[in-house]
Image (spheres, grey):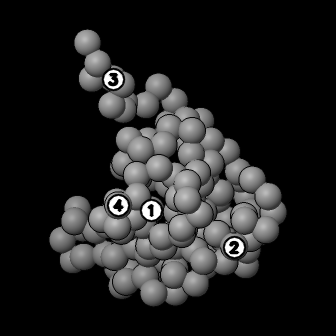
């Protein structure tokens, strides 16, 4: 993936992270999901007083994309204040659609900490092929 695309995704994720609703953790996360056709879908985390129903930025972006008809993805940029990586639930949701997805992990100043395939973050992931007989 070229540097211009990486920068575009990271900047989109930084912008949307500012919209996060995180009154409990104060841990804002932004994600920018890059579809095969070049479309970018962003998402931020939205917390809730009932903690288990909180939705992460990565899943917000994915659900937005799927609801708009996208199901093939190339990359996702995830930004946090300290370059945190996607949680296990987000890794699993993304794996469903793109086991080889490129994951770009950055912080709010745009520093990229890691670029790696999703399958390295979720080795031996459970996906649609796992259900084959």
Q: In this view, does 39 lie to the left or right of 25?
A: right
Residue neighbourhood size for the residue with mark 2, other residues' Cα within 10 Å, grouped as few (<14), some (14–19), many (≥20): some
The label on residue 8 is 2
- Label 2 or label 3, whichever comes before in sequence order: 2
The label on residue 130 is 3
- Label 1 or label 4, whichever comes before in sequence order: 1
- Could you tell me if the residues under marks 2 and 1 are in contact, i.e. CB atoms within 8 Å? no
Quadrant hosting residue 39: bottom right
The Cα atoms of the two marked residues, 3 and 4, are separated by 24 Å
Residue closer to the observer: 52 or 43 = 43
Taking the spot 51% from the left edge, 30% from the top edge, the residue there is 123
- The residue that label 1 is drawn on is 58
- Label 4 or label 2, whichever comes before in sequence order: 2
The Cα atoms of the two marked residues, 3 and 1, are separated by 23 Å
Q: Is residue 51 left or right of residue 56?
A: left
- The residue that label 4 is drawn on is 69
């Amino acid at each position: 993936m070229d540097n211009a695309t990486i920068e575009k995704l990271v900047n989109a994720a930084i912008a949307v992270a500012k919209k996060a609703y995180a009154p409990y953790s104060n841990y804002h996360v932004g994600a920018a999901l890059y579809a095969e056709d070049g479309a970018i879908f962003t998402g931020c985390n939205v917390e809730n007083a009932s903690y288990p129903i909180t939705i992460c930025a990565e899943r917000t972006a994915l659900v937005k994309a799927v609801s708009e008809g996208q199901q093939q993805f190339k990359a996702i940029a995830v930004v946090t204040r300290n370059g945190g990586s996607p949680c296990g639930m987000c890794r699993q949701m993304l794996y469903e659609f793109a086991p080889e997805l490129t994951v770009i992990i950055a912080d709010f100043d745009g520093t990229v900490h890691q670029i790696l395939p999703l399958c390295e973050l979720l080795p031996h992931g459970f996906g649609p092929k796992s259900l084959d007989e």
